Amino acid sequence: MAAAAECDVVMAATEPELLDDEEAKREAETFKEQGNAYYAKKDYNEAYNYYTKAIDMCPKNASYYGNRAATLMMLGRFREALGDAQQSVRLDDSFVRGHLREGKCHLSLGNAMAACRSFQRALELDHKNAQAQQEFKNANAVMEYEKIAETDFEKRDFRKVVFCMDRALEFAPACHRFKILKAECLAMLGRYPEAQSVASDILRMDSTNADALYVRGLCLYYEDCIEKAVQFFVQALRMAPDHEKACIACRNAKALKAKKEDGNKAFKEGNYKLAYELYTEALGIDPNNIKTNAKLYCNRGTVNSKLRKLDDAIEDCTNAVKLDDTYIKAYLRRAQCYMDTEQYEEAVRDYEKVYQTEKTKEHKQLLKNAQLELKKSKRKDYYKILGVDKNASEDEIKKAYRKRALMHHPDRHSGASAEVQKEEEKKFKEVGEAFTILSDPKKKTRYDSGQDLDEEGMNMGDFDPNNIFKAFFGGPGGFSFEASGPGSFFFQFG
């Protein structure tokens, strides 16, 4: 940059008509020398002022414009510098440094093709000029980055586009177009603070930049701040009524907001079927709006849970956390659905995720409850063994035992294969265990609360189901597992 912006100490040939005014020429030269002194001190603002005075005295001197262009470049005012550089080569087409500065300004502003033409002209005048050779390569590199970025944007490979724009901006630091494309891709990647920062920097320099306003709106839109996003889209369209992207985004944002609100209204009114349809329609509006769609999936999951479509609710919540893996509400909703479908390991996993993120008492209790249910689920389900509900009465438990004990008693299967006999013997024993626990209020309470029954001194491994059977049915004599023939015992009911 410094090499490209080096000021010219030697004055270029002036037009004949200016030489008649020797006094103006001397004064202009004095101003130029003062400008050079300030330039050397890096006081570019003062250098600019003196070069301007020199130009005012001799407006046809190419060197003065060239020096002021160099100063403006150092101040980062490339568009103004471009005007001065172009004026310098209009006055003197053989002015190599003028062509170099023109090319450098074009390149800094992102117009690589125009930059190439300027550098080519400099090389025509001085084919060994090392700076012109290098800058020509730089301009071609920028054109290649642009080409790759255009292709990758169509492929939605936004990371690659950001990479290309970063490389291009090394040579074109003042190119708003490259910055906007980078910011748009950062927004598409969910890197909203970075995208906002780039757009805000541009808006500080140009508050009417429609592209920057669009990107600001896009970030808010993707962060689910839809109402604020619409304001920016409208402002962008006010600056550029034909801004296609802002127009589409504004339309999507308004439609998404309306559908989501209608869905919420239907849900609150208890019209779950309509709420489901509205949330589904909203999900079809813009697949790129990840954050809003995550909320819509979670909302639809809540609707499905109300409709007792628990598998569908789990799927919706899973889609929500795929889009936003920090979405606590979706994890909580899915965990509850897992609990309701007795998928306790999955519920524990979700509650652990929630508690790691938000260590509240409520989340801790939910985790403990899920862990308890998981522990209980790994034991024998005595209710299922007897075929009764968890709220079954004492009489219902007795009736269930009577039915199952008679169904699985070994003597009833004495003629079956050894394998069947072994299986029925096992089931008979489990039925006795279930009745022993569920018919005893104290043991039943401990069992229901998930406590270990062994603490009661009951070793179920040594349990004899025959004793329970005898005690329940009564009758003379009895029976044993060894009884082999039908009629080896008889049932007597009171």
Image (spheres, grey):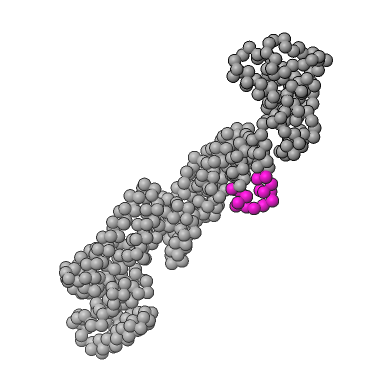
Q: Which contiguous range is marked in magenta? A: 353-368
Q: Specify whether 125 is left or right of 276.
A: left
Q: Residue at x 35, y 57 (%)?
A: 164
Q: Quadrant of residue 378?
A: top right
Any magenta on residue 55?
A: no
> How many labels were placed on the picture?
0
- Residue 142 horizontal side relative to residue 421, left or right: left
Quarter of the rendering containing residue 447: top right
**Quadrant of the rendering where the N terminus is positioned:** bottom left
Report if residue 130 is visible in the image.
yes
> Is residue 316 depicted above or below 394 in this figure?
below
Quadrant of the image occupied by residue 384: top right
Give coordinates of residue 292: x percent, y percent. Answer: 53, 47
Relative depth, front residue between 442 and 353 = 442
- Residue found 73% across the figure and 25% down from its top: 464
> Which residue is painted at 51% across and 46% down in the image?
323
Residue 358 counted in the magenta span: yes
373 vs 27, nearest the viewer: 373
Residue in the image at 69% along x and 10% along y: 486
Q: Is residue 102 left or right of residue 202?
A: left
Relative to 212, is 287 above or below?
above
Q: In the rendered view, would you say 375 is above or below 118?
A: above
Horizontal arrangement in the rendering, residue 252 relative to residue 487 (left or right): left
Quadrant holding the C terminus: top right
Q: Is residue 258 above or below residue 70?
A: above
| x and y percentages locating residue 425 in the rendered image | 66, 21
Residue 90 seen from this side = no
Image location of residue 379, percent across then percent down: 66, 34
Of residue 296 and residue 258, the one placed in the foreground of this image is 296
